[in-house]
Amino acid sequence: MTDTANKSSGLRGFLIRTFADPVLLYTVLLLMSIMYHYRSSLAFAYGVAAYLIGWMVFRIFDFVNKHHIIGFFACIILYFISARAAYACMEKGLENYPISWGLWFFTPQDALRYNKWYTLAIFILFLMFMLSVVYYFTRVRYRIFMNFLIFIIPFTIYGKEYEKMPIGYIIALAVGYLLMMVTFRQLRESEKEVLINKGEAWKSVAVFTVLFALFSTLFPKPVVQEDRAILETLINADTLTDRLNQMLDVFRDTSSGEQFRTRQSDVIHYIVEADEPMRLKTATFSNYSFDRDDWKVSDIDTYYRTYSESTFDIDFSREVADAVFFAAGLDSDFAKKYGLEAYAGKKLAYPKKKKAVVLARYGVMNGAETVPVPQGASALTETNFKSQLALSRAGAVFTTDKQYYIDDSFTFEYVPGTALDDDGNRSLVQVLADRDDYSLLLTDAYEVLDNIWRPDEETSHYRDVLNVNEAFYDDYTDILLDYGNDKKIYELAQQITAGCDTEYEKAKEIEWYFYSNDFKYDLSYQKPQDENVHDFLFKTKTGVCVEYATAMVMLSRAAGIPARYCEGYLMQYEIEDTKVKSYRVSANDGHAFPELYIKGYGWVIFEPTRSDLVQAQKTETKSSTTDMLKKAGFVMLIISAAALILLVVMPYLTHKLFILINRKREPDKAVTAVMHRLCKLYGIDSTNTAGEAAQLIAETSGADISAVKELFSKSEYGGIPLSEADRDKAMADYLSAYEALKESKRKNRRIKTSPQGGN
């Protein structure tokens, strides 16, 4: 029987045993849970790689276990190759990347752009570390405490960035860790200690899994609506929130928009009293780099004017048509030159001006410098801030010599952005937009008002409007029409805007394009290092507000409309139970959006980001951890129940299948199969002879398999051919031994559960 067993445990048995190695499978699970944090979409691929590489590395470790001296050098070579590969990945990743691998590793991933080479390096390092320590503390020297420390490594990686590990991984790791303890436990036998049968241990694990699934599925979960603002303020790391404010303020030369790719903090930065949700602008950028996929400022963004008084006008662009028609009413020659006689003194019909109060609630040591400006803001009308304020050419308000603090407030007057929805307004604007000499028209209109001495407020205001627009319009067309001469972007812009008669119609068509062409807002998408706006438009169609805003700016420029990229906040969450309608604004509301210059009107904010998804995903209205646990538990319950049913039914099914198959085998093979089957059922080691096996079976259940023993010996050792009658005798012994074993197990259970049996 030993020779036969040796024949059957060849290459096939070795492969099955090593590829189903629980140590290897557990290590792969650890690696997958870690790599999900760095690149969720490739977690499975990393798992496959870890499985294949791990199998080969474990074979080296097996060799080391048997040949210590030679194995030591084999290990040194293995670790050297791994370290060299990781280092090569780090060097490759540093190309065109601003920070080193070490800084990348210690920096929160949500603040960085994805780097595939750095991620591969971390995979290699974690793979070799996990393979080494898990193998050592299970197969060489079992240490339950060290295994627990290894088990919590993935949790610490997620915890350092306040990220939630997927519930599926949590359950799988917990069950996997339990299975490791069961499989590799090392207990000393003594009078006081009893070694547990592994079959019984597996049953306990199955019961644990089912109970865990039942608990997470059926038990009600408490829902707590907590206010985390105070807690986050205490532990929040002023550093994190400071970093956010720095990312959103006007004193930056460059922005890659990384702050908008993930949740940041629920700490409230501002309370805004307003009648409606809106966007708040803090900074603008004019120059886009396709190579770096980032934005840089130009003079349009950085030039500013300081104000000693606490109130001043903000937007001088929206009333361009009003100012030109006002000039036409004062100077008939100007009106005649540009054919504006019929429009002299006309004005657009604007929505009623409203008030928005921005109250600072960001009370950190360093204060803040940039004041969020509501969209459509026409003036800062009131503030309790006593120091000097400044206004950039792009409409950003900020302090110049002192930061503002908690409870400082800024009251803005703003015009809701619906003026161009009116047909009459669009017609008046188009009178100016159709002119090829638009820049000269603005200059002449400004000179009309500048040469007429009229000290009234209206003339002064329109003079300022024309001064700003005629002075900067050439800059707008020089700088804000650059789309990198990308041919595909140009062709797409022409395709989208085909048939549009006005710039505003073109802008709206471009805005709508992102809603109707399968673009996906995805906070979990980790953008590769070399991906830019071109890839977003024509390949991935996946990103966050940064990608949407950048794409609309590029398409608008390609369509001939000056456009710039803006950053700030998306104000959207109303505070309940307040006397004045108010909204809370936190770092999580950070947002990017485009502003377009519509000739004849001025700057208009658009929203290409799919707002329904901005609200759903940006604010993480995802399921709570308990909800996800419930769903995962439900799935686990179904799987576990199916596994238990299979465990209960499988012995019976395999028994019946064996009878069916074995009755059709050749007699010699049938007798051999009966002997192996009985040894497996009774847990008899393959090193025992047929006679020893028969004796052990008799001792266990009282079954007599002497016929099988003799027939097996004649066939295997004597080479005597067997008949079909012999096969029937062997099958009769098998059925007898099978029933005897069942009865023996039932009797043992009754003894264990009876009062006498417990004494």
Image (cartoon, rainbow, N blue to C red):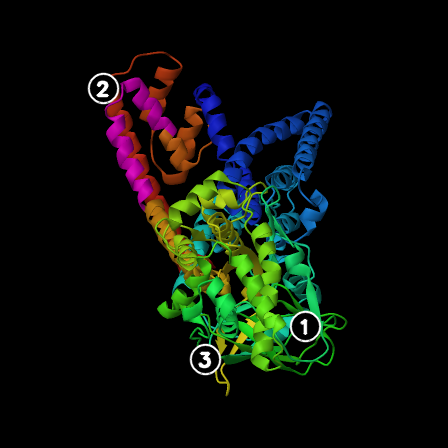
Ranked by sequence position, the earlier of labels 3 and 1 is: 1
Task: Examine the structure image and report whether residue 654 is included in the region drawn in magenta.
Answer: yes
Q: Which of 139/427 is in front? A: 427
* Place of residue 233 in the rendered image (x, y in percent of width and height, measured from the top left): 65, 72
Residue pointed to by mark 2: 724
Residue pointed to by mark 3: 352
* Place of residue 70 in the rendered image (x, y in percent of width and height, measured from the top left): 71, 23
**Type of amino acid under label 3:** Lys
* Place of residue 367 in the rendered image (x, y in percent of width and height, measured from the top left): 71, 72
Label 1 vs label 2, nearer the camera = 1
Question: In the drawing, does residue 532 fall left or right of residue 629?
Answer: right
Residue 584 got which mark? none
Q: Is residue 403 above or below residue 529?
A: below
Cβ–Cβ under 8 Å for marks 3 and 2: no
Residue at the spot 59% in from the left edge and 50% down from the top edge: 478
Q: Which of 337/751 is in front? A: 337
